[in-house]
Amino acid sequence: MKYIFLLLISVTLSTRLSAQDNDLQLARQYTQTGETQKAADIYQRLYRQDNEAFFQPYADVLISLKKLDEAENITKKILRKHPAESQYAIMLGKIYTEQGHPEKASEVYAELVKKLPPDPASISSLATQFYQVGDIDQATNILKEGRKLLRNDRLFAMELISLYRMKRDKPGVTDEYLNFLPDNPVYLNQAENVLASLYEGTADYDLLRSALLRRLQKDPQQIVYSGLLTWLYLQQKEFDQALNQAMALDRRQHKGSGNDVFELCRVLAANEAYDTSIRGYEYLLTRNKPTDDLYIPTKIELVNVKASKITSGKYTQADLLSLEKDYQALLNEFGKNAGTAFAMQKLANLQAFKLHKLNDAQKLLEEAMGITNMRPQLYANCKLDLGDVYLMNGLPWEATLIYSQVEKANAGTPIAQDANYRNAKLAYYTGDLQYAKAQLNVLKAATSQLIANDALNLSLLISDQLAVDTAGKALKQYARADLEIFKERPEKAMMILDSIDQKYPGDPLSDDIMMAKARIYLQQKNYPLAITQLKRIVADHPNDLWADDAIYMLGTIYEDQLHEPATAKDYFQKIITDHPGSIWIGEARKHFRSLRGDKPDTSP
């Protein structure tokens, strides 16, 4: 009988719990569908069956129905029964606030603060309860009061940072990180990322600058503050200040590793602050010995930055010859080996495309191909460049053999697609238009957006021209000009382009000739003339092949070269509105949102 009795109790309890679960699920469903009164009826029944387990959802649904007096009554009752349970007091304060009695809520919360135990876990738990009911201000207040109680201003830093971020309280986040970082320098990168996502302009960075300088005056040896100040200067594009700060920190560390200055110089070069980057590398060479780990990488990067500086703007023949000497000195000092093969590649490109020393470039690349233990990707790129030099040197058969070898050795990779594209271009340059078109049609599906777009445009160019002239006479002359552009011989290219109209009047290559001339002017950094050609394409050929390319190019010129963001934004918007099917649509959206001032995580 005893066992039968226990079994009956067990079955009864099980049945009751199952019914409660079904009711609870139904109440939640009513809440989701907006049938709040039906949900309230169920919660009321469940609450009366089990006086405490369903208090929270019942109180919440009463508040949502604005039955605040009823919610207040049940909360006061359970609070009298459990005066030490803070969640009931928090609920009562919430109800007072909903009733329009914030002073009553403040009294309840003040009583909770008065009863705060000197225990970090309890304080953090109470703050979490406030956060869970959506009261971020009181959660923040509890943590700050807990600091006072425990006499420790660095407690709860990460919790407060999270709460301040939710409130977008920039001074709060800033101060908390500055309190937290000295004892936790490994969080510096996190702090930089958070601040970058939170700050919206110069005023925000000025706030950080002032706070950092005040703290550095009190504690000048605090390395993490100096590192954050370097980052701040970078965000504000005060590149000289960033380098000065990094070098000062390096000296303060009694000639530390120099890695921070080295990495900063790379960032500076990426931001086209070439002179500042060069100054940083030269500083490292003065403080490092040839046996130090950074000595060789610094020498190499110094020459690379000088190359970037020269080739990014207008330059003289003397500038190019000086750079050639720098590369040759580098190779003489460190030898020609796997570690310097990339310098051989860069020197060969300089000789081929800028100095037009094709034989010297060919010899250097052939020498590089004989180096053992070279990185496979670098080897493939050197080989492709050698194919380009063969092409420019009047050796097309050798060039196509090289391209084909690279494609076969790297099947299924972007390098193989690059090699295939160069082979297609070679066929186009040499007048084998049908073969070029067949290869280009395959490459229209390339994973590289740039190759796919170029292949599509060139394929369409060939198709359109062959439809008008099956022999492609004008197109073959245009291809000769294109080859001269590739060789960076703009004067010869321009002469050929100007002769096409004279020799083949009325041929529909006018927009292609404009685009070719625009590319020449861009090579010469003559942006006004490039803009003139591109604008003519947009105005005279708004629905033709090059229209969206011209618009996108105009946007990048105004953004990157002329620094006119408003004009650039208009052109990127024109891609979005007038050419939604353009291959540039994704990039145009990115540029447009950036120029509009959107945050990185802003939805489309």
Image (spheres, grey):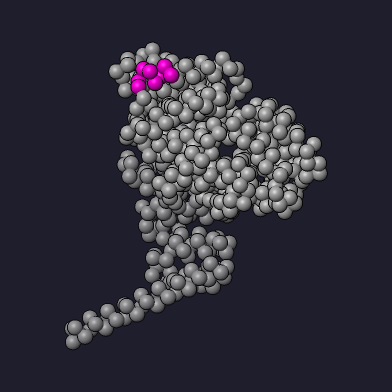
Q: Is residue 436 left or right of residue 234?
A: right
Name the residue at the top extreme. 286
Residue 330, by quadrant, is top left
Q: Residue furthest left?
A: 2
Residue 332 highlighted magenta (yes or no): yes
Q: Is residue 307 visible?
A: yes
State the residue at coordinates (61%, 47%).
Answer: 432
Front residue of 113 and 303: 303
The image quarter in which residue 124 lies: top left
User: Does the magenta portion include 479?
Assistant: no
What is the number of callouts on the image?
0
Using the image as rendered, state which of residue 299 and residue 357 is in the foreground: 357
Q: Which residues are magenta?
A: 328-335
Q: Position of residue 368 (x, y in %)?
A: 39, 30
Work out whether residue 596 can be spotted: no
Going by the image, does 230 lie left or right of 65?
Answer: left
